[in-house]
Image (tube, rainbow, N blue to C red):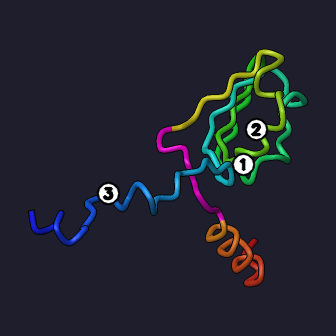
Amino acid sequence: MSALRYGYKYEYKKLYHHDPNQLNDDIYLKVYVSFNDVKNVPTDDFEWIEQWHAQEDRKYLSGVIALKKLKNSSWWKENGTSLILEPDPVLESIEERKLRKKSLELAGLL
């Protein structure tokens, strides 16, 4: 009662001071790609390729690619190509790996 007498207001401050979440496509995805012909897969778009396997009729690769590159292309939906996200596919940053690679290059190990 005294709160009403002194004009206090009860409110949920989170409702008024909350910034809504925004989707961000600056992430990288670990993917598994299956395809018939390597010319249908832009391997240069991948940040790195971890595994590569080729048989006579089908090829496979496992690698990391930027979500933006997938959104702006359709190669992964065409020509019998199949793209599957790997377990725990989201990498928010690849800068640490790039720094390690540069360090190994400077040391003459790559």
Residue 10 painted magenta? no
Front label number (1 vs 3): 3
Spatial CA distance of label 2 from label 1 is: 7 Å
Packing grade of label 1 (10 A; few <14, some 14-19, many >=20) is many
Q: Would you say the magenta stretch is mainly helix, strand or loop?
A: strand
Which residue is drawn at the image coordinates 70% and 25% (left, top)?
34
Q: Is residue 25 above or below residue 96?
A: above
**Residue 75 horizontal/vertical position (percent):** 83, 28
SS label for mark 3:
loop
Q: Is residue 1 left or right of residue 76?
A: left
Q: Do labels 1 and 3 touch, CB within 8 Å? A: no
Q: CA distance from mark 1 to mark 3?
A: 39 Å
Residue at which label 2 appears = 70
Q: Residue at x 41, y 54 (%)?
A: 15
Name the foreground residue: 74 vs 38.
74
Q: Amino acid at mark 1?
A: Ala
Disc 2 and disc 1 in contact, CB within 8 angstroms: yes
Which amino acid does the dot numbered 2 rest on? Leu
Identify the magenta region: 87-94
- Say if 34 sits above or below 108 in the image: above
Residue, disc 1:
66
| Disc 2 from disc 3: Cα separation | 40 Å
Percent x, y of residue 59: 73, 27
Which of pointers 2 and 3 lies earlier in the amino acid sequence?
Answer: 3
Q: Using the image, tell me which numbered label, if any, was put on residue 47.
A: none
Q: Amino acid at mark 3?
A: Tyr
